[in-house]
Image (cartoon, rainbow, N blue to C red):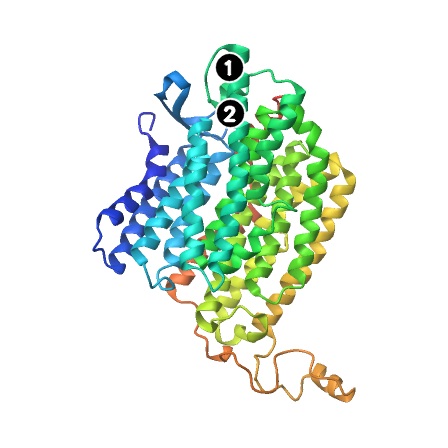
């Protein structure tokens, strides 16, 4: 293992698959699917090997790879992972594999080009999490931008071009600000030491003035805040999610948003400790606003996918809250929320995709009573709905509890306000589950013995629950088939991880805590 460049193998396995498909212009859709599945499976299995071999007692970087790239400019090919990045690498490879499976039937045009784009996106995302040189990190960061915009703009829904352009412009603006910050940091470190380097660990040893930290922190922060996305930089997210294909939403929610949280932990906190303390109270305020705003917006949505998108804004607010309360429970909670959100929200987007493939609509009014003819679907949906609202025993509870605990320790008011979202999350998630799985379907004759219906009719009111009594334009949900084996296989690992982290989070916390403790020890 010591001589095996496992991080490079994990990162570039998808790229090899993309290159094969690019060079094989006559590849059939079936061949494209199987090549993408093989490439993503290899990357995933290698990441499992890496996680098994990872030493959870160490806070230092592991599996490092280094060689000079442009030595005269201080640019090197440096890779490595610690307890912060290693779990995110595993999450990325798992969700890439699931995205390949989730695209198997829904993607029917330009299949070869789609899988080239998806595999290139996977390489970019993995490179972000393993890069230790700022130049290399920026290259991978920018690689992610174009494939994601293409997935939305080419294979998305009716307003896909608008959503893709909006996503591209928002994230490009953040990327350019970060580039300014990288150049400023590079020049300032050279001015102090006479050494040209973009090694993140070496740059963290520099002594930077408060004024320099203040503005450079802001340049990095805005790039990562747009990616999270924090309120008020979130407006691109609902459009991107609604218009993206199912697999695009899975990757967007499960991995791309985590790149912002990872950026705060890898760059903002260790490089600019003084500025972090200065900006932290304002960021905590924005985080609490995001938590409440996202939940309230989810509460009023009739588009199922948009509801899940706004719930993402709320959940990612716990990530930034946990990070910038600057204590161990908060940081641990932020990392667990990032991973749990990757499992749970990705699964909810898969759930939405299952319904869209059958009904060709995401309007909640089109559904009802699916627990009767889709019991496996209803079981998975119920599990992930409960995890999303933070039920104890599931992964969502562990992360949000720790983040709120950190919030109470640093800013009691933030912990109190953040706790309110537990009520709101239960409100919108249980309501959507009732609407989709339990109440009668649109057009279904009402039960004459339904006490709510008899009470409503006695007072001259329309029926309370269920769909319209008259004709409707939607397919009858009572005719929908249950999950296919491929849909079930895509959801099963996410369900198992959601339960495992909820019931027994100790192995994950033991992996996270040494690196997080070392981060707090650098002047935090």
| x and y, in percent, of residue 402 in the image | 65, 41
| x and y, in percent, of residue 377 in the image | 49, 67
Residue at 49%, 50% in the rendered image: 252
Residue 494 appears in view: no
Marks 2 and 1, how far apart at CA: 11 Å
> Is disc 2 surrounded by few (<14), some (14 to 19) or many (20+) residues within 10 Å?
some
Specify the quadrant that holds the N terminus.
top left
| x and y, in percent, of residue 442 in the image | 57, 80
Q: Secondary structure at mark 1?
A: helix
Depth check: 210 or 447 in front?
210
Residue at 22%, 52% in the rendered image: 25
Left or right, 379 with respect to 126, comes to right
Q: Secondary structure at mark 2?
A: helix
Image quadrant in which you'd find residue 366: bottom right
Q: Which residue is mark 1?
A: 190
> Is disc 1 surrounded by few (<14), some (14 to 19) or many (20+) residues within 10 Å?
some
Left or right, 452 with respect to 246, comes to right
Q: Is residue 343 above or below residue 55?
A: below
Q: Which mark is residue 207?
A: none
Q: Is residue 431 above or below residue 495?
A: below
Q: Is residue 77 above or below residue 251?
A: above
Q: Which mark is residue 183?
A: 2
Depth check: 107 or 181 in front?
181
Residue at 46%, 22% in the rendered image: 199
Residue 239 appears in view: yes
Specify the quadrant that holds the C terminus.
top right
């Amino acid at each position: 293992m010591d001589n095996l460049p496992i991080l490079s193998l994990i990162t570039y396995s998808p790229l090899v698959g993309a290159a094969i498909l690019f060079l094989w212009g006559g590849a059939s859709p079936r061949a494209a699917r199987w090549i993408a599945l093989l490439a993503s499976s290899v990357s995933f299995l290698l990441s499992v090997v890496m996680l098994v071999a990872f030493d959870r007692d160490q806070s230092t970087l592991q599996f490092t790879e280094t060689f000079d790239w442009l030595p005269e400019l201080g640019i090197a090919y440096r890779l490595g992972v610690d307890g912060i990045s290693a779990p995110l690498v595993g999450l990325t490879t798992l969700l890439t594999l699931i995205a390949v499976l989730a695209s198997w039937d829904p993607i029917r045009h330009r299949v070869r080009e789609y899988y080239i784009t998806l595999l290139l996106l996977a390489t970019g995302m993995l490179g972000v999490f393993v890069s230790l040189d700022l130049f290399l990190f920026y290259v991978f960061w920018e690689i992610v931008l174009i494939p994601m915009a293409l997935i939305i703009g080419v294979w998305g829904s009716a307003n896909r071009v608008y959503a893709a352009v909006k996503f591209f412009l928002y994230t490009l603006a953040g990327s350019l600000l970060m580039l300014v910050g990288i150049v400023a940091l590079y020049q300032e470190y050279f001015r102090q030491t006479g050494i040209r380097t973009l090694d993140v660990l070496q740059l963290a040893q520099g002594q930077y003035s408060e004024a320099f930290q203040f503005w450079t922190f802001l340049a990095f922060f805005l790039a990562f805040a747009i990616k999270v996305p924090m309120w008020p930089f979130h407006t691109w997210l609902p459009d991107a999610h609604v218009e993206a294909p199912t697999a695009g939403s899975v990757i967007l929610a499960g991995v791309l948003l985590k790149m912002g949280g990872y950026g705060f932990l890898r760059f903002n906190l260790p490089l600019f400790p003084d500025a972090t303390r200065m900006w932290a109270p304002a960021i905590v305020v924005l985080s609490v606003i995001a938590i409440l705003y996202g939940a309230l917006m989810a509460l009023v949505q009739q588009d199922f996918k948009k509801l899940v998108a706004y719930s993402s804004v709320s959940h990612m607010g716990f990530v930034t809250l946990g990070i910038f309360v600057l204590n161990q429970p908060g940081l641990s909670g932020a990392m667990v929320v990032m991973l749990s959100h990757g499992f749970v929200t990705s699964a909810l987007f898969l759930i939405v995709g299952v319904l869209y493939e059958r009904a060709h609509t995401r309007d909640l009014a089109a559904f009802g009573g699916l627990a009767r003819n889709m019991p496996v679907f209803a079981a998975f949906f119920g599990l992930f709905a409960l995890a999303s609202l933070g039920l104890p025993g599931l992964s969502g509870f562990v992360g949000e509890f720790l983040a709120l605990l950190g919030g109470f320790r640093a800013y009691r008011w933030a912990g109190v306000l953040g706790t309110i979202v537990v009520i709101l999350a239960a409100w919108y998630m249980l309501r959507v589950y009732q609407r989709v799985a339990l109440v009668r379907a649109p057009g279904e004759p009402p039960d004459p013995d339904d006490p709510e219906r008899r009470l409503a009719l006695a007072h001259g009111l329309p029926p309370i629950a269920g769909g319209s009594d008259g004709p409707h334009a939607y397919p009858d949900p009572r005719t929908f088939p249950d999950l296919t084996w491929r849909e079930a296989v895509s959801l099963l690992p996410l369900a198992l991880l959601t339960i495992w982290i909820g019931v027994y989070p100790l192995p994950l916390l033991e992996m996270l805590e040494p690196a997080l403790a070392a981060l707090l020890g650098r002047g935090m």
